[in-house]
Image (spheres, rainbow, N blue to C red):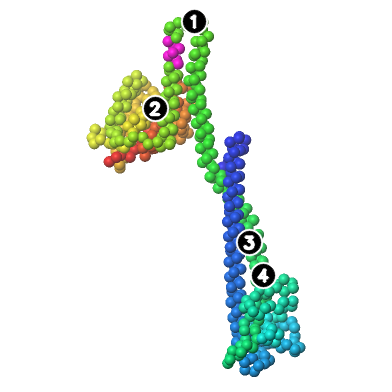
């Protein structure tokens, strides 16, 4: 859609478009930000739960082996080397840090070593009894009172630790505590990657959303801009139509006021001019009020209306005009059964009258205008066909617009304001019907009015 920024109204629409785009983008930024935070927290929680479950499984396996060894032998050296191949008892020389060898058949295919696990066995008073697995440097000695703990070493690396009590299998005498923990460095690296993905994808996504918001704002404002332009055009046309008779009245009055004396014939002629222009103003204002009521869908008294009676009255009213214009006005309608519609009879009369009057006005002498009424499939179809000058295809899409005239010179020889067909269209739609036109230049026009019947 093209946006012209030269005029003030279009600058207003462009500013509104920017504001809507900013609001759309801002709201989506908040929504996506909260969604990204929620996804990140869900991923982190799922990994924490999985890591804790794995840590607890490893700790329980080691706990059972250590507890059984302490109960039976009282010495940790006899713990299976398959489970703890690098066990270091306090007071002995050990290889620290431990470098895991490949292919240990330990718990869960070497999970104890590949996952950077460490093990500490403490005596009941908290004295270190033995260590195994990965040996973290600078890790503070945590309290053994808490079952789960999260620790950080001197470099800020995070560790997760679980504490399980060791008791004799026979009399449940406390033998000490088992601390099993693991490094969360791989977990922290994974979360850092997730954060980078979210941080990098958010600006790209917001750019796409901003572009889509700009397009959607333009799409949303397009009907508003079209309506605004129609209102502008309607206001300009209405002002022009009102100004013409007012100017004529003012000019006539001023010309009379300049005369030192005025005769009775001159005064009568002046009053006739003023009366004609006043009648023109009255008709225009009445048409505008009718259109306003139809636009606001103000309720009008509805009753069953016989279309045969309406068309017969119109034929009778326009017969003299047709004879004066040397035009054959023909009415073709069934006598029985009566075709009735629910509606306002005065409005329906105005609907058909406007169309037939328009046909008579644009049909040359010795031409023909035919009104035909038929009922098909619960619809009343009124056809007004003439042998007039026809309508150019480029004008057919606009003839129902308000103040639109095919004759662009605005000669107004007929005295019309270009509202007749617009009123007809509005009345037809207010009654649940429609009006269409088919025409060829030089071959006449056919207006088809469809209305829902009441039976």
Please, what secondary structure does the residue beneath circle 2 have? helix
Label at residue 358? 2
Q: Start and end of the magenta stretch?
A: 268-274
First of labels 2, 4 by sequence position: 4
Which percent across, then down, holds residue 131? 70, 84
First of labels 3, 2 by sequence position: 3
- Circles 2 and 1: CB atoms closer than 8 Å: no
The image quarter containing residue 116 is: bottom right
In the drawing, does residue 367 fall left or right of residue 250? left
Front residue of 180/276: it is 180
Which percent across, then down, holds residue 382? 33, 34
In the drawing, does residue 166 fall left or right of residue 382? right
Front residue of 321/451: it is 451
Which residue is depicted at the point 71% across and 78% down?
A: 141
Location of the C terminus by quadrant is top left
Please, what secondary structure does the residue beneath circle 1 have? loop
Q: Label 1: which residue?
A: 261
First of labels 1, 4 by sequence position: 4
Q: Label 4: which residue?
A: 188
First of labels 1, 3 by sequence position: 3
Please, what secondary structure does the residue beneath circle 3 have? helix
Label 4 or label 3, whichever lies nearer to me, is: 4
Q: Label 3: which residue?
A: 198
The image quarter containing residue 276 is: top left
- Circles 3 and 2: CB atoms closer than 8 Å: no
Which percent across, then down, holds residue 273? 45, 15
Asked if residue 272 is among those painted magenta in the image, a careful observer would answer yes
């Amino acid at each position: 859609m093209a946006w012209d920024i030269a005029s003030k109204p279009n600058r207003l629409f462009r500013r509104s478009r920017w504001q809507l785009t900013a609001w759309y983008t801002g709201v989506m930024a908040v929504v996506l930000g909260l969604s990204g935070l929620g996804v990140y927290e869900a991923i982190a929680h799922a990994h924490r739960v999985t890591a804790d479950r794995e840590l607890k499984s490893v700790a329980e396996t080691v706990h059972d082996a250590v507890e059984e060894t302490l109960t039976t032998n009282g010495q940790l050296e006899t713990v299976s080397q398959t489970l703890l191949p690098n066990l270091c008892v306090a007071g002995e020389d050990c290889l620290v840090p431990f470098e895991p060898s490949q292919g240990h058949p330990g718990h869960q295919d070497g999970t104890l070593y590949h996952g950077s696990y460490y093990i500490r066995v403490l005596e009941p008073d908290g004295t270190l009894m033995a260590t195994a697995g990965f040996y973290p440097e600078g890790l503070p000695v945590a309290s053994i009172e808490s079952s789960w703990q999260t620790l950080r070493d001197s470099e800020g690396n995070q560790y997760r630790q679980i504490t399980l009590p060791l008791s004799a299998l026979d009399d449940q005498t406390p033998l000490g505590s088992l601390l099993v923990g693991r490094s969360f460095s791989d977990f922290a690296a994974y979360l850092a990657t997730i954060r980078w993905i979210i941080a990098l994808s958010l600006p790209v996504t917001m750019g796409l959303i901003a572009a889509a918001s700009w397009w959607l704002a333009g799409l949303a404002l397009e009907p508003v801009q079209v309506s605004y332009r129609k209102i502008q055009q309607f206001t300009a046309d209405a002002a022009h139509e009102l100004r013409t008779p007012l100017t004529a009245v003012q000019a006539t009055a001023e010309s009379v006021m300049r005369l030192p004396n005025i005769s009775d014939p001159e005064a009568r002629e002046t009053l006739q001019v003023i009366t004609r222009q006043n009648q023109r103003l009255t008709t225009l204002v009445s048409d505008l009020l009718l259109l306003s009521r139809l636009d606001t869908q103000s309720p009008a008294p509805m009753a069953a209306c016989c279309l045969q009676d309406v068309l017969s009255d119109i034929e009778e009213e326009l017969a003299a005009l047709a004879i004066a214009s040397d035009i054959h006005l023909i009415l073709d309608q069934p006598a029985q059964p009566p075709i009735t519609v629910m509606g306002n009879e005065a409005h329906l009369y105005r609907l058909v009258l406007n169309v037939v009057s328009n046909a008579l006005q644009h049909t040359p002498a010795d031409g023909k205008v035919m009104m035909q009424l038929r009922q098909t499939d619960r619809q009343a179809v009124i056809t007004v066909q003439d042998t007039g000058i026809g309508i150019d295809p480029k004008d057919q899409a606009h003839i129902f617009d308000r103040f639109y005239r095919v004759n662009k010179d605005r000669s107004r020889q007929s005295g019309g304001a270009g509202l007749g067909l617009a009123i007809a269209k509005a009345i037809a739609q207010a009654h649940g019907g429609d009006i269409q036109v088919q025409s060829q230049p030089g071959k006449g026009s056919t207006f088809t009015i469809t209305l829902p019947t009441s039976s």
